[in-house]
Amino acid sequence: MLLPPMNPTFQKSRETQKRTNLYLVGFMGTGKSTVARMVAQRLGMEWLDSDAEIERQAGRPISDIFARDGESGFRQLERAFIEAGHPERGCVVSCGGGLVLGAGMIGQLKSRGVLVCLQASAGTIHERTRSNQNRPLLNVENPEERIAAMLREREPYYRASGTQILTDHRTLLEVVAHVCRVYQREARDFERVQRR
């Protein structure tokens, strides 16, 4: 399943275009989109949300993709987005919660930039997501129980993905500052490896 070409309207400075991409991963409700948007603003980079880009490129909402193509169809679109649906440099990308689950996806992300995983407890995630009806995987009788089960299942993937940053009991500004520090350190290491 191929996606149409990425959005051609990105106008980035030469400095921004040179920067290594940053990918924020983690479970839904850990703050990826909000943090990524603020980090991108601080770093002067473009912010992309993988779910929003997939919806735009596929021309339909995620709920419809899940209903018609199932979770596997959606995961194929996520893979296509990471492989060719976004700029290779100068972006902070907030990734969907299950994006790292596909075979080889963590490696794909690490080969394209810095990977940071945001984490939160099941209770915090439930509190942050309970009023959002646009979460197909949480449309169940007991969403907090479902969150806890999914976190247990996904923990090995999140742990293997990159630097872990806990968002529970921290202000947004604290998390953003921490992500920026990690990015600046790890982007230097990434660029050093790329030059070899």
Image (cartoon, rainbow, N blue to C red):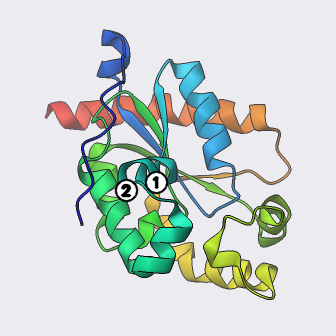
Q: Give the image location of residue 20, x and y in percent.
A: 35, 31
Check contact, mark 2 vs mark 1: CB within 8 A. yes
Q: Is residue 124 above or below residue 45?
A: below
Amino acid type at circle 2 is Ala
In the rendered view, does 97 fall on the left or right side of 133? left
**Secondary element type, mark 2:** helix
> In the image, residue 155 lies at what x, y percent?
57, 74
Vertical comparison of 166 with 10: above or below:
below
Q: Is residue 10 above or below residue 63?
A: above
Q: Residue furthest bottom?
A: 141
Name, please, the residue furthest toward the left: 196
| Distance from the alpha carbon under mark 2 to that under mark 1 | 5 Å
Please name whichever residue, 5 or 126, is drawn nearer the observer in this view of the structure.
Answer: 5
Q: Quick check: 114 left or right of 155? A: left
User: Which residue is at a point 34% across and 63% down the rendered structure image?
Assistant: 77
When asked about the image quadrant of residue 86, the answer is top left
Q: Residue at x 43, y 65 (%)?
A: 100
Q: Quadrant of residue 18?
A: top left
Label 1 residue SS? helix
- How packed mark 2 is, by other alpha carbons closer than 10 Å (few <14, some 14-19, many 20 or more), is some
The amino acid sitting under disc 1 is Glu
Closer-to-camera residue (92/177): 92
Q: Which residue is mark 1?
A: 55
Left/right placement of residue 18 relative to residue 119 reads left
Give 164 or 144, whichever is nearer the viewer.
144
Residue placed under numbered mark 2 in the picture: 58
Residue 121 locus on image (x, y percent) = 77, 67
Of the 4 image quadrants, the one containing the N terminus is: bottom left
Query: Which residue is rendered at x = 45% and y = 60% of the image?
Result: 161
